[in-house]
Amino acid sequence: MKPSELKVKKDAERDVVFHYSREERLAMASAPKGPKSVSGAFFRGFLRRGRLPSLLPLLVVALVVVLVFKFVVPRASSRAILSGYEAVLSAFPYEDALLVGVTFIPGTVRKRAAEVLTASISFELPDTGERLLLSEALGDGPSTIRGKMKYTGKERKLTAQVRVGEKAASLSLGVKKP
């Protein structure tokens, strides 16, 4: 049987010839291909279309960035646990002053002790270099140590070095504009 040919001539300078053979197509479709695996079919199709090789470097870079920020880069925190107390840093701009404070909340693990712990705090505004040192004895209930610092509106960050007993932590907080 002679393969069918289709000649198309429509506003063309030369003939366009299409070749189609049903027998050739059926022979290619019925050729043995090997065992099929359901799980492997997905990955073969994914690789055949070229998507995995182009996504793989992107996935590796994303994973490295997440790991670096999770474990290597220290995160600034406004909370810490010190000697059984949770210390929470706060700051509020008010007119030409920045009202700063650290609230100490006794944790459930903290047991009543005969000794009275003293909290020492060193507040600092890195933008202006202004410092404020405060110290107070902590009781059994929640307590807040407050102070007032000069505020010009240019300050963006407040840091505090907090020490309770023999434990110390560095806290930081972004200062919001009023």
Image (spheres, grey):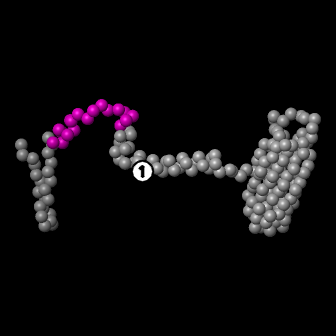
Residue 27 image point, x, y percent: 17, 38
Residue 41: image quadrant is top left
Q: Is residue 14 above or below residue 19?
A: below
On-image quarter of the N terminus: top left
> Residue 156, percent across and down?
74, 62
Write down the residue under mark 1.
54
Label 1 environment density (alpha carbons within 10 Å; few <14, some 14–19, many ≥20)? few
Residue at point 84%, 47% (across, down): 163
Residue 130 sits in quarter: bottom right
Could you tell me which secondary element the residue under label 1 belongs to?
Answer: helix
In the rendered view, would you say 44 is above or below 147?
above
Residue 176: x and y in percent read 74, 61
Q: Front-most of 151 and 178?
A: 151
Q: Is residue 26 above or below residue 10?
A: above
Q: In the image, is residue 5 part of the stretch drawn in magenta?
A: no
Q: Residue at x 86, y 43 (%)?
A: 165
Asked which quadrant contains residue 154, the reply is bottom right
Q: Is residue 81 visible?
A: yes
Q: Magenta segment range?
A: 24-41
Q: Amino acid at mark 1?
A: Ser
- The outermost residue toward the top is 35
Residue at x-position 80% and y-position 54%: 160
